[in-house]
Image (tube, rainbow, N blue to C red):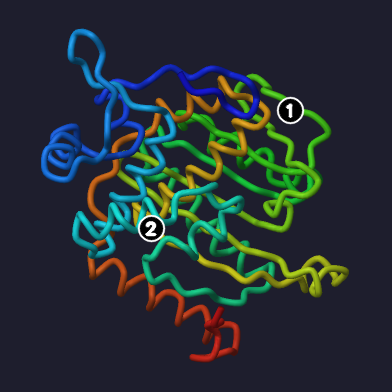
Amino acid sequence: MHSTPTGTIELPLAIGVLARRAGVATATLRSWEARYGFPEPARQSGGHRRYAPDQVALVAEVARLRHAGLSVPAAIAAARAGAGPAPESFFASLRRSGRGLQTHLLDKPMLTAVTRAFEDECLANAERPVLFGAFQQERFYRQSEDRWQELARTAERTVVFADFEAGRAPADRPVESPLAADSPVRREWVLLCDGPNFSACVAGWEHPSRSGRRDRDRTFETVWTVDPVAVRSATRVGIELVRGVDPEGARRIDESLPGVGGGASADLIQATALFGRILDYAQGTGGDGDLVS
């Protein structure tokens, strides 16, 4: 058994549950175990494999590194070497995803337009997705609450994060999950859609030096992706945020996640890069809009 920081006891996982939560085929896990001794199960008296819950993140990381081009032994070694707490922000998760994502400096009107486009695509194409949104402040969420009610109507699970005083689960509306005062997500603007046939995430980070401007003049260092592997890494951030206030709700979200297939195609990656370049020129930054970090 495994004890979470909140004191909740999580039971060992069957291989099928581990495979589903990590987004890896059961046959793949059996092959890795037979050839590389990973993941390492405990055996019950009847011979059944059981895995510690913290293996989920490790297996998912090996899968991500495999999609990024590493061999299985190299991916296992890198995942074990880097094992530790998951990123605490959606933006950081995407930047660390190893998927070659570029950042762009967008003002609020442009970021609003980009987010609306991704929201519409999610409504049009995603089947029962998990949705996360981060709004920094509750007042910003209230301005978009009706739109998010529509997004939530056809979603499997919908959670929004902001500086709410308390968590709420209004009927037919997104679950409202409060952020800790020191959470880096309090500086982030996020839309995440993780579905079986469409995945996307937009994450903007507002630098402290840019606070205090007029609302429409605020700027965000922004990254986006439609790569299912990168999106899933950001989804894990949202689940951990929920787990801090509602362990049972986090478990339900985790169990509702679809499996992750391959990463985005080369054509889709190229189209995403072209979209970013177009936005740079639209804002007058041209090819110099990308930020290096």
On the image, the x and y values in percent for residue 104 come to 55, 76
Residue ID at (56%, 82%): 291
Q: Amino acid at mark 1?
A: Gly
Mark 1, residue position:
167
How many numbered badges does the structure rendering display? 2
Sequence order check, earlier mark of 2 and 1: 1
Quarter of the image with the N terminus in it: top left
Please rate how many residues cluster around mark 1, counting C-alpha atoms within 10 Å: few if below 14, some from 14 to 19, many from 20. some
187 relative to 179, above or below:
below
Residue type pointed to by label 2? Val
Residue drawn at x 43%, y 47% is 122
Is the residue 49 above or below the residue 222 in the image? above
Q: CA distance from mark 2 to mark 1?
A: 29 Å
Q: Nearer the viewer, residue 173 or 40?
A: 40
153 relative to 31, above or below: above
Q: Position of residue 245 (x, y in %)?
A: 68, 28
Q: Residues within 10 Å of mark 2 (few under 14, many from 20)?
A: many
Q: Nearer the viewer, mark 2 or mark 1?
A: 1
Quarter of the C terminus within the rendering:
bottom right
Position of 48 compared to 277: left or right?
A: left
Residue 136 x %, y %: 74, 51
Residue at which label 2 appears? 226
Is label 2 in contact with label 1 (beta carbons under 8 Å)?
Answer: no
Q: What is the secondary structure assignment of the residue under circle 2?
A: loop
Q: From the viewer's side, name the closer residue of 3 and 20.
A: 3
Report the residue at 30% width, 50% height from top: 62
Residue 27 occupies which quadrant of the picture?
top left
Residue 209, horizontal then vertical, whole percent: 81, 74
* Residue pictured at 55% horizontal, 51% vertical: 191
**Please, what secondary structure does the residue beneath circle 1 have?**
loop
286 vs 88, nearest the viewer: 88
- The disc at residue 57 is none
